[in-house]
Amino acid sequence: DKAKAFIGLLTAEQKAKALFPFDSPERDNWAFVPQPRKGLPLKEMTEEEKEAGIALLKAGLSEKGALKAETIMSLEAVLAALENDPVKRDPEKYFVSIFGEPGDAKGWSWRFEGHHLSINLTLAGGKLAATPSFMGTNPGEVREGPKKGTRVLAAEEDLARTLATTLAEAGKAVVYTDKPPGEILTSAQRSVKQLETVGVDYNSLTETQKDALMKIVNEYVGRYRSMVVEAELKQIKEAGVEKIHFGWAGGLKPGEAYYYRIQGPTFLIEAANSQNNANHQHTVWRDFDGDFGRDFLGEHFKDGAH
């Protein structure tokens, strides 16, 4: 409904930018860096259209997720001031793209994307996919100006560091290297494969530590609406939580560069923070088979072929 309401406000010229066929190769051409993008930018929308575009974004996210997304966008203004580059850093350089016909049971999707934010929701026949899901923040902690103290992705960092520290102090090999990669390893790849298994496995943890690990997973999945959360957590549990691994690279003290990943049979979470003196976070949640709804769309098309 939110997608249809948004489309209903657009001119023919705007529709030409915002709307794509569902099978367009643009659908999985996602990115999180400030680069030229397809889609309709907030900058070219009326106030009413902007509100409808943000309403579409919020329709997919939880309250907490929506707050994170909107704060990430607002940080572009902070960067514009810090770097004195308002053309490159612009809180209105976020783009809405809709693929296919909203409500089409065979499949449709939307993307809301710009610097440090890529939200991709795919829907078909009652199934829903929320990956790839990217949130980043620069500065990780705002240290000056009216937004001083803002840490958009505080929980993603603090929960993981606390658990890694607890495990390291207990003598567990959670830290697999003291040299963190400078970036998430999967970058903005269109599809991802399992990475090397590192760190500790779920079964080696105490009950409290297991809960702490799942709380980190929840922080990523919980950016989305409850129906997404329920479906995704069910899939993660059915694939076997005991097969989940958690590995940390880098220093454990706040302010030190780090990288971590949580990997299960079906999913991957990565976080990296080493740029800008470790004050620039990138976080991503991927699904090996289900990014862009590939798993259920494949089933869907196979079913339709009989």
Image (cartoon, rainbow, N blue to C red):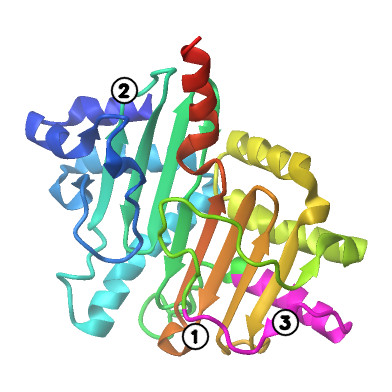
C-alpha span from label 3 to label 1: 18 Å
The amino acid on which the numbered mark 3 sits, given as a three-letter code, is: Val
Residue that numbered label 1 is attached to: 278
Q: Residue at x 53, y 47 (%)?
A: 63
Say whether residue 240 is left or right of residue 115: right
Residue nearer the viewer, 123 or 222: 123
Which of the two discs, 3 and 1, sits closer to the camera? 3
Magenta stretch: includes residue 212: no
Query: Which range of residues does the magenta coloring cover?
Result: 157-182
Residue nearer the viewer, 209 or 86: 209
Residue nearer the viewer, 157 or 179: 179
Which dot marks residue 101?
2
Earlier-in-chain disc, 3 versus 2: 2
Which dot marks residue 48?
none
Q: Is residue 155 above or below residue 50?
A: below
Disc 2: CA contacts within 10 A as few (<14), some (14-19) or many (>=20): some
Residue 78: % across, % down: 31, 75
Q: Is residue 167 above or below residue 37?
A: below
Secondary structure at numbered mark 2: loop
The amino acid on which the numbered mark 1 sits, given as a three-letter code, is: Ala
Residues at marks 3 and 2 touching, judged by CB atoms closer than 8 Å = no
Q: Which residue sits furthest front?
A: 306
Q: Is residue 20 visible?
A: yes
Earlier-in-chain disc, 2 versus 1: 2
